[in-house]
Image: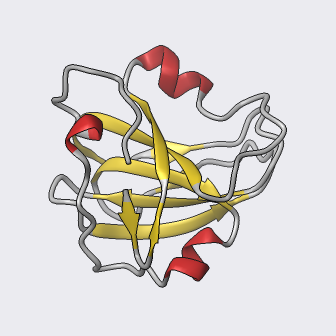
Amino acid sequence: MQIGNRNFELEVARTQAQQEKGLMERDSMPADHGMIFTFPEEQVLSFWMKNTRFSLDIIFCDSKGKVVSIHQMKAYDLTNTSSDYPARYAIELNKDATTGTGVKVGDVLNIPSAARADAATTAPAN
């Protein structure tokens, strides 16, 4: 998936079990990888970092792919990090990755079909 000026390979977390597990209990993630969480409708989304061993950037997007907020989350932090506005997608990348891509609130990202909330498969999204 193109995010700003870089391409990322994203794992898709669509089911409740996949979303609950997220990136927990991993020691690291390659610089060009991430995870996209898909939801059936727009809502204010909240994430925490329980059992997540490395800090992350999180990009919240609405159903059209518009970036509605970007935040950083610290490893093991149990504080909720919420989207500033209703969102349908959340994309987790390594900490500071968003700075390197140039992505900002208001940008529109092309959510790959494999990651759309109504997609029937759980294939990786490029």
In this rendered view, identify the residue nearer to me: 97 or 22.
97
Question: Is the N terminus in the top left, top right, bottom left or bottom right quadrant?
Answer: bottom left
- Residue 110, percent from left and from top: 23, 61
Residue drawn where x is 25% and y is 48% of the image? 112
Residue 44 in view of the camera = no
| Horizontal side, residue 35 vs residue 95: left or right | left
Residue drawn where x is 59% and y is 57% of the image? 32
Q: Examine the image and state in which quarter residue 52 appears.
A: top right
- Residue 88, percent from left and from top: 27, 46
Residue drawn where x is 79% and y is 32% of the image? 51
| Horizontal side, residue 98 vs residue 2: left or right | right
Residue 111 in view of the camera = yes
Residue drawn where x is 23% and y is 34% of the image? 117
Q: Is residue 83 above or below residue 102?
A: above
| Horizontal side, residue 112 vs residue 56: left or right | left
- Residue 84, percent from left and from top: 40, 65
- Residue 99, percent from left and from top: 59, 81
Q: Examine the image and state in which quarter residue 5 appears.
A: bottom left
